[in-house]
Image: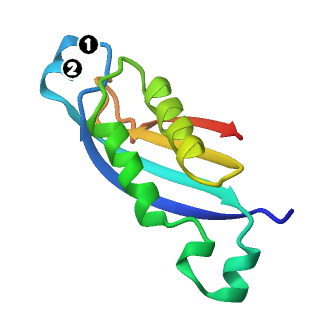
């Protein structure tokens, strides 16, 4: 079976994630990249949306997971996103990258990223 992928890159979300009380109270902006793999052979032949994985529906599932939950760890959020996509869509693999942009470090750090990948 062929495996091609679709990438949703640079999704900006706001959520209440983190260990510190301040993060959980005021929330923060996160940036997500979602990659998912499937066999798109039929879609390439038919040119029909029903023969592929509708990335608008995947995006909606990601937003439902982000907006409907509060976790201490970005790792837990990334896992929930991956598992939600695997459960809802005909994909073989999902990778979620979550970047935390505002860090409480005294020196300059662009971001920290958590990457979680799950297979069907």
Q: Nearer the viewer, residue 21 or 89?
A: 89
Residue 9, percent across and down? 46, 60
Check whether the beta carbons of the residues at disc 1 and disc 2 lie within 8 A of each other.
yes
Comparing 94 with 21, the one in front is: 94
Look at 46% across and 56% down and name the residue there: 58
Q: Secondary structure at mark 1?
A: loop
- Left or right relative to 93: residue 110: left
Position above or below: 13 against 36: above
35 sits left or right of 37 in the view: left
The image shows residue 34, relative to residue 84, as above or below, that is below
Badge 2 is on which residue? Answer: 24
Q: What is the CA distance from the residue labelled 1 to the residue labelled 2? A: 6 Å
Q: Is residue 13 visible?
A: yes
Q: Point out which mark residue 20 bears.
A: 1
Residue at horizontal 42 percent and vertical 48 percent from the top: 32
Residue occupying the far left of the picture? 26
Query: Where is residue 4 shown, x and y percent of the image?
Result: 72, 66
Q: Residue at x 26, y 13 (%)?
A: 20
Placement of 60 over or under 81, stated as above or below = below
User: Quadrant location of residue 10?
Assistant: bottom left
Q: Is any part of residue 101 visible from this angle? A: no
């Amino acid at each position: 079976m062929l495996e091609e992928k679709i990438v949703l890159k640079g999704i900006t979300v706001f959520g209440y994630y983190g260990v510190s009380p301040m993060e959980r109270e005021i929330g923060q902006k996160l940036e997500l990249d979602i990659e998912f793999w499937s066999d798109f052979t039929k879609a390439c032949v038919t040119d029909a949306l029903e023969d592929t994985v509708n990335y608008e529906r995947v995006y909606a599932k990601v937003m439902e997971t982000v907006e409907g939950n509060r976790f201490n760890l970005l790792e837990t959020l990334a896992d929930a996103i991956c598992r939600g996509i695997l459960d809802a869509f005909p994909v073989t693999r999902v990778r979620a990258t979550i970047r935390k942009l505002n860090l409480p470090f005294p020196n300059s750090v662009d971001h920290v990223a958590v990457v979680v990948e799950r297979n069907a």
